[in-house]
Image: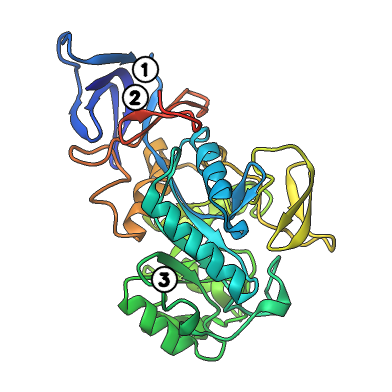
Amino acid sequence: MKLIYNATVILPDKIINNGAVLFSDKIEKIYTIPEKDNKDYEYIDAKGAYLSPGFIDLHIHGFAGSDTMEGTRESLENISRGLVKNGVTSFLPTTMTMERKNIQKALINIKRMKKEGMKGARILGAHMEGPFISEKYKGAQAADNIINADLKLISDFYDLIKIITIAPEIEGAKDFIENITAKGIVAATAHTAATYEEIKEAESWGLNHISHLFNAMTSLHHRRPGVVGAALTSDNLSTEIIADYIHIHPAVLKLLTQIKDSSKIILVTDAMEAAGLRDGEYSLGGQKVYVKNREARLEDGTIAGSVLTMDKAVKNMLNASNLAVNEVINMATINPARKLNLEHKIGSIKEGLKADLVLLNKNFEVEKTFIAGKESRGDFYL
């Protein structure tokens, strides 16, 4: 048993000052005042640091020189180990719009590695971004590989895929969305030319999530509300946010939090393989990406994912908004857990849940990460 004491414990609805948490692989007890010395416990003095649930990234392509689409054990292991340093304890490796064989290879690899388990952040399943998208709003996705909605492509992976990002206006989208939502897969949209009215109709089919809101979709216009207008006015639609101040201006982040219930906002990184590395030339979905001044772009200037880390996303959202610390932490913890119907296992500091924990200093920098109760630095458990 470990007991972290003298901690600022972040719960979904409040913060406990000078709190303590007792845990093994699961959270055993939460104290407002720690109990007296027990020689069987390993004591960890937080020295006033924040104790947060482990971060959950629902949309990430790569990290530290590796990409999900490489479809190898080494690539996912490298991503998993690297994410621990940023407080991420669970994630969805995210596929790109590439050839069918490449997508299926990546999914097979994710399925294998999820079953085997990781030394770093655990794999919860897969997020498919494309290939069922709009060419007009393809962003950094390859146009040659865009196809209409096709259930055959995913039929062997219903138990693995957790989210699929699809443009609801494409051929076959209605039947596709109805089928995947019946199987418990989240139907999301981005890379879409859909109108406000088309999004509202798609909601009746089961669409209930917006990937990287504001990016690669129809924007808000006072006579054409678009996807953004639908996202801002619908209580049913949750929204991903890339809070790197590149994809979205800080003022827009603040505006979003003033309009949208914070429980429906989920922080993601949409990171590509350059995350955690220096500026230079990299790859995303088979396309060259140039990273300069922490911006990742294709040769034509199109934004190509990000080099954002989840701890930085949390800090940026805190600085941009007037929200309480626990409300922002929820965006990286309990909110994504709820989206995947996993809040009974992960996503908050609650007795009986997995002891996925992160110690953050007052500058919201990661000091320690625990996965199922074991302190991890990615390469090994301590």
Instruction: Name the residue rendered at 41%, 75% in the picture.
Output: 156
Residue 152: image location, x then y, percent: 47, 83
Q: Marks 1 and 2, how far apart in space?
A: 8 Å
Rendered-image quadrant of the N terminus: top left
Q: Dot 1, crowdedness within 10 Å: few (<14), some or many (≥20)?
A: many
Mark 1 or mark 3: whose residue is earlier in sequence: 1
- The reply to whether discs 1 and 2 touch (Cβ–Cβ < 8 Å) is yes
Residue holding disc 2: 8
Residue 56: image location, x then y, percent: 43, 47
Q: Which mark is residue 197?
A: none
Residue 207: image location, x then y, percent: 42, 76
- The reply to whether discs 1 and 3 touch (Cβ–Cβ < 8 Å) is no
Q: Secondary structure at mark 3?
A: loop
Left or right, 164 with respect to 272, comes to left
Along the line of sight, the residue nearer the viewer: 313 or 90 = 90
Along the line of sight, the residue nearer the viewer: 172 or 374 = 374
Q: Dot 2, crowdedness within 10 Å: few (<14), some or many (≥20)?
A: many
Instruction: Name the residue rendered at 46%, 61% in the picture.
Output: 126
Q: Height in image: 186 above or below 249?
A: below
Q: Marks 3 and 2, how far apart in space?
A: 41 Å
Along the line of sight, the residue nearer the viewer: 114 or 252 = 114
Left or right, 344 with respect to 214, comes to left
Q: Which mark is residue 157?
A: 3
